[in-house]
Amino acid sequence: MKRNTWQREAVREALDGTEGFISAQALHSTLHSSGSPIGLATVYRALGDLASSGEADSLQSPDGEALYRACSTTGHHHHLICRNCGLTVEIAADEVEAWAKTVAAEHGFTGAAHVVDVFGLCANCTKLQAAGE
């Protein structure tokens, strides 16, 4: 178990105060603008630790950037993420779990793990887009 340093706590608190997913660079900028002396490498390390312990969700954006957010669901889950506004909904997906196990077994794999994040437009952004805004 990682010890709880002031840097890790500062990152956790900043992440808790953030809506949706955020990059390490953006979170570092937020911390720095509020007067924190924390370094970018420390933010990366703390986010990695929080993701490993299940306290933060981590995903890769469509552009390949690692993004993080405070996790509100314990255990394995998936996300629906709006490409426009960043709204994120945590979902269970039993069908995905069954499919992953079946495909892995068909190819002789055991202990398979997976990450599934679905990107699209939320209902509000779809409505705004249809209205031409």
Image (cartoon, rainbow, N blue to C red):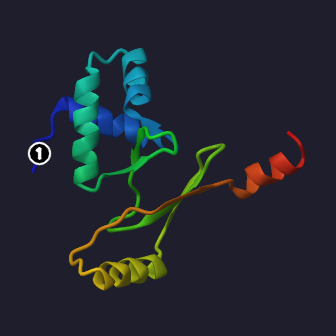
Q: In this view, does 53 lie to the left or right of 20?
A: left
Q: Which residue is drawn at 66% across and 43% down?
A: 84
Q: Is residue 72 left or right of residue 86?
A: left
Q: In this view, does 24 lie above or below 85?
A: above
- In this rendered view, identify the residue nearer to me: 43 or 11: 43
Where residue 131 sits in the image (x, y, percent)? 90, 47
Viewer-proximal residue, 126 or 75?
126
Location of the C terminus (image quadrant): top right
Q: Where is residue 53 in the image (x, y as percent from the top left)?
A: 22, 54
Check disc 1 and give the amino acid type. Answer: Lys
The correct choice, above or below, for 94 with respect to 6 in the image is: below
Q: As displayed, is residue 106 above or below residue 32?
A: below
Looking at the picture, how far across and down is residue 54, in whole percent? 28, 56
Which residue is drawn at the image coordinates 38% and 62% (left, top)? 115
* Residue denoted by label 1: 2
> What residue lies at 37% left-to-right and 25% top-to-bottom?
28
Residue 34 occupies which quadrant of the picture? top left
Is residue 12 or residue 95 the one in the foreground?
95
Could you tell whether 76 is left or right of 95 in the image?
A: left
Q: Quadrant of residue 16?
A: top left
Total numbered labels placed on residues in the image: 1
Q: Give neighbour class at mark 1: few <14, some 14-19, many 20+ (Cα, 10 Å).
A: few
Q: Where is residue 5 in the image (x, y as percent from the top left)?
A: 15, 34
Q: What element carries label 1?
A: loop
> Measuring 82% from the left and 47% from the top, which residue is drawn there?
128
Q: Residue furthest right?
A: 131
